[in-house]
Amino acid sequence: MSQLCAVIGIGQTKYATKRDDLSIAGLVREAAQRALEDAGLTWKDIDAVVLGKAPDTFEGVMMPELYLADALGAAGKPMFRVHTAGSVGGSTANVAAHLVQAGVHERVLTVAFEKQSESDAMWALSPKYPFQPPLLAGAGGYFAPLVRSYIRRAGAPADVGIQVAVKDRLHALKNPYAHLQMPEISTEMVKASPMLWDPIRYLETCPSSDGACAMVLGNEQAARKAANKPAWVRGTSMRSEPAMFAGRDQVLPRAGRECAADVYKQAGVTNPRKQIDVAEIYVPFSWFEPMWLENLGFAEPNEGWKMTASGATALGGELPINPSGGVLSSNPIGASGMIRFAEAALQVRGQAGAHQVDGARMAMGHAYGGASQFFSMWMVSSDRP
Amino acid sequence: MGDPIKVIKTPIHLDYQVLAGRDLVRFLNAIAEGKFIGRRCPSCKKVYVPPRGGCPTCAVVMGDEVPVADTGCVTTFCIVNVPYEGQVMKLPYVYASILLDGSDIPFPHLIQGIEAKDVRMGLRVKAEWVPAAELKPTMESIRWFKPTGEPDAPYDSYKDHL
Amino acid sequence: MSTPRDVAIVSFAQRPAVRAERQADDTEMLLPVLTEAIARSGIAKKDLGFTCSGSCDYLIGRPFSFVSALDAVGAWPPISESHVEMDGAFALYEAWVRLQHGDIDSALVYSFGKSSLGNLREVMVMQLDPYVLAPLWPDSIALAALQARALIDSGRASERDMAEVAARSRRSALANANAHVKGDFDVDQLLREPHLVAPLRKHDCPPISDGAAAIVLAAGDLARKVCARPAWIRGIDHRIEPHSPGARDLTRSSSTKIAGQKAGVAEADIDVAELHAPFSHQEIILRDALGLGASVDVNPSGGALGANPMMVAGLTRFGEAASRIIDGRARRAVAHATSGPCLQQNLVAVLEAR
């Protein structure tokens, strides 16, 4: 019952702390318009729109698909809004892919965005409830203890996080859309930056960005007619586990492992480290790179930091991770998952410009959300299945 | 005719009620008596503090109420240095996961009574309650957790709770 | 589209809607509902292939509110799960799409919502264009009143017609233990009541309700195995219209008309229609858009006028319609759900026994 699905158009906005040159509608339209142009299509060629974003308190607009229907050319069409916390950008792309694979639509526009400068993201992430003291200082405050746990468990040297922070910002210099452009970035600079939530430093943390990312997904017929080379969707997966339960491993969540195993199986990947040419994974705090390398089976448990330290994950290395600069360089929260998925597609289409991994044919997009409990992943390839 | 308007401020004020839920109400009432209680899942037998409406892994209603000590150990923690909207604590402060003796899941709170840089995984701590006359059904009845002076808990005793 | 895979609703459970649930939190509300829906489905929880929920953060004033509700599902070992920030009926649509893939055969769909926690009329303003509409704070009843006025002015309905919808709905709700606004009301007496926001009177408006509901979907042979009379989804579609109330004809729900055509309402002999019409005049508009004849039994459950837990009321329409097929009271039903101001977005399905 399954049709083929391919990415036939990709559009991104320039990510920045505050896009005060555009309204929310303008922001999503900028990405969507670019995706349509890349696909050689117009608004009327789209059958359905799938929108994704993180909590509505980030902009102060409830159920924004209603307000954005016009901006995204959705009048008279089906429109949908997905919300799976931080993994939403990925889940949204997966839902859009399923619509094509199910044969429900031929060409689907999918957009993920966040214009979090409109509200206050840190407040939105740590609301004060009665009955309890306000302890939590945003996402960083939540994840920093997990990072400490990882460092202890894996016996990792303290500078691995710094290395990732430098690597991803150097990658970002080759991505004109990336928010942080820091040509002066260095190990010393990151090390000297203030500890925000010990052990996470300021420069090991993602920025807060406005931005949108869009893709046009099409079936095989649409892919054959498309203006540019398609990126074939070879697998999609989603897994969730409870946020808190007795004995939960939050550092290497089982949901992440099983989500990866599912998508690898669909894509025919039996040796991820060898068969995947490039991966865009969700790393909002630098230490998540070694942690996810283990969770995704690229490295053995407790060895992820070694893979990072060896330089294997830099552009030019054995398995480049986040050549776009990743979440560490741009983080419009609701969009970040889709940016990972879109960057993976850019790679296998040969469209990644200065941050292109030569000859990339099989790429992975990964996103996570909540208390490291929601995972969405996809595999794309230049080879038709 | 001035510059085009780029930004408008639209203040929004919405009032909501927050409901504690049956299990949380019982927990908070115990807190008002200076005690911690947990509930044991009849299926997996784990003790949850605070007790929840259902066991998150088994999806069954929680079973027996179980008293839980107000002592425990720090499993992991971070030192918060960054100010944020709604912040009440003075910086820097230590936000820790504390595994109370008798429970199977750590719960978050603050550590005081020790320099932030000396806090470590495995540190044995005890709850510092507000004076008896000030006890109320809110987590704010516990000011923070402070070191007991006991030797640190061995890594193996909490490594599955990181 | 190539022939879609046969998917049916095989069970439905709901919590009696109440004006304000003051004891149970989201997990406590959901746990018995999910347990019942799964038990009735005849499918073991561990065999469910996909889970999808609908809920809304702004409704209850809490970001990530769907996360704590996951405790009621027991997501261990990890499950394949998704969520929409929309009525649970749209979560059902996502689950239906997922089942088309062919690799899994069943899905759990649920939604919950407590409209009582905030000031619903104000909260709904947050759905509007933040630049030019929301700052005016046109509350949900005022907007509905605009639509009702337009309908009356078009000559296609009167305040009496609206009162008749309200009276009939509340009378039907007498037989529904899960509705909480019910009674035998006299139309003339209703019309003597003062306007709330003209031309709407209190009886034309939905109640404020807290609730939760769940549905289990199953495909093909599995549905036939576990359910004697599955409610097969013969067709399902949804459409959205332009956002601004000034940019569309409020008296004709064009999106419902298109969705109804795509779902195949016209080709089917409909016995029952559960329409998600929070306001009395909206039922008239929806009937018209779907082309439902006078013989169709509309909202035997009482509809959203009997109970309107936001984010749940649409899914409940699907459940109520499906129940009547599963227990043999109906052969073919229309289920409808709406989202957005003045029926901006609409989902329609045709359910049938075979």
Image: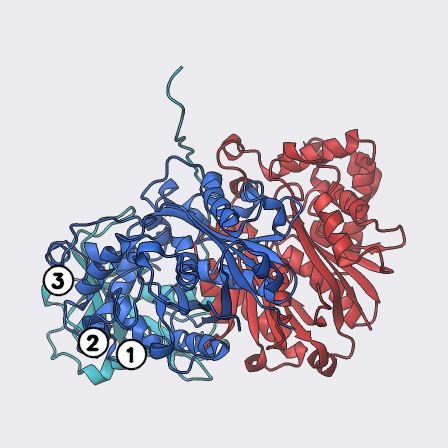
Chain colours: A blue, B cyan, C red
Badge 1 vs badge 2, beta-carbon distance below 8 Å: yes
Look at the picture and state if C181 lies above or below B101.
Answer: above
| Residue C298, position as x, y percentages in the image | 81, 54
* Badge 3 amino acid: Ala
Query: Which of the chains bears the disc numbered 1?
Result: A
Q: Amino acid at mark 2?
A: Lys
Q: Can residue B64 be seen by looking at this rendering?
A: yes
Q: Mark 1 or mark 2, which has the lower sequence index?
A: 1
Q: Residue at x 63, y 75 (%)?
A: C102
Label 2: which residue?
A306
| Residue A235 percent location from the top left of the image | 50, 72
The circle drawn on residue A299 is 1
Q: Quadrant of the C terminus of chain C?
A: bottom right
Q: CA distance from mark 2 to mark 3?
A: 29 Å
For image coordinates 42% across by 68% down, the residue present is A375
Query: From the viewer's perspective, is A5 left or right of C146?
Result: left
- Please tell me the numbered disc located at residue B116: 3
The answer as to whether the residues below labels 1 and 2 share one chain is yes
